[in-house]
Image: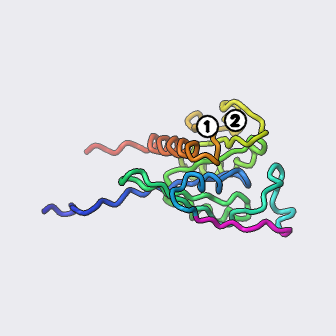
Amino acid sequence: MAFGRSDGPRMPTAIKLLIAGGFGVGKTTMVGAVSEIRPLRTEETLTDRSVGVDDLSGVEEKTTTTVAMDFGRISIGDDFMLYLFGTPGQERFWFVWDELARGALGAVVLADTRRLADCFPSVDYFERRGTPFVVAVNCFEGAPVFELDEVKMALNLGPDVPVMLCDARSRESGKNVLIALVKHAYGRRPSAAVG
């Protein structure tokens, strides 16, 4: 019997992915739409204490906010387990990002064309860390529609950063974004040295 060989069931490979973006862009919605388990949410009710702190422009109907993270999971056969971590959107909760980002393969940056500048901090964060990311433009009803190349130019993204449309409420749309992210992240990894 060879050392290191197990005849028992294989453990799936765990892949950690982040869902980031500005306040109210749809991170919690996306994690909930694609997760095969009931997602863990750290939502709290917005109170009058957030007046002057949280900018509700464009999301005036929002009544709750993520204060730590959202968590969901997707199994891909018996081989892979995707762990999804939704980041908090407000600046006052950004201190948790470093912990959430540790060990992540990559990130989805959700964007809202009504408040495109809100995703700059996420883009900057992942660029500084060298974390592969894709930008997914969440298609809100009544939001301005732009060509993806226009969004890419407005966000000053490099030519290798994928930009796509999505509907954070749709399981299928969210899965397509995650597939694009995993392909992008693995495509950026250096080839294993042949020895």
Q: What's the magenta region? A: 40-49
Q: Is residue 17 left or right of residue 115?
A: left
Q: Which residue is drawn at 37% across and 57% down?
A: 12
Residue 94 image offset from top left, x and y in percent: 68, 62
Asked if labels 2 and 1 touch by Cβ distance under 8 angstroms, the answer is: yes
SS of the residue at dot 2?
helix
- Is most of the magenta stretch helix, strand or loop? strand
Q: Which mark is first along the chain, 2 or 1?
A: 2
SS of the residue at dot 1?
strand
- Tell me the residue that label 2 is attached to: 151
Q: In this view, does 12 lie above or below 117?
A: below
Residue 139 image offset from top left, x and y in percent: 70, 40
Q: Which mark is residue 163?
A: 1
Q: Is residue 193 above or below residue 62?
A: above
* Residue toward you, 189 or 46: 46
Marks 1 and 2, how far apart at CA: 8 Å
Q: In the picture, residue 148 is in which quadrant?
A: top right
Q: In this view, does 77 lie to the left or right of 72?
A: left
Q: In the picture, residue 62 is in which quadrant?
A: bottom right
Amino acid type shown at disc 2 = Val
* Residue toward you, 81 or 153: 81
Q: Which residue is drawn at 57% across and 46% down?
A: 174
Amino acid type shown at disc 1 = Val
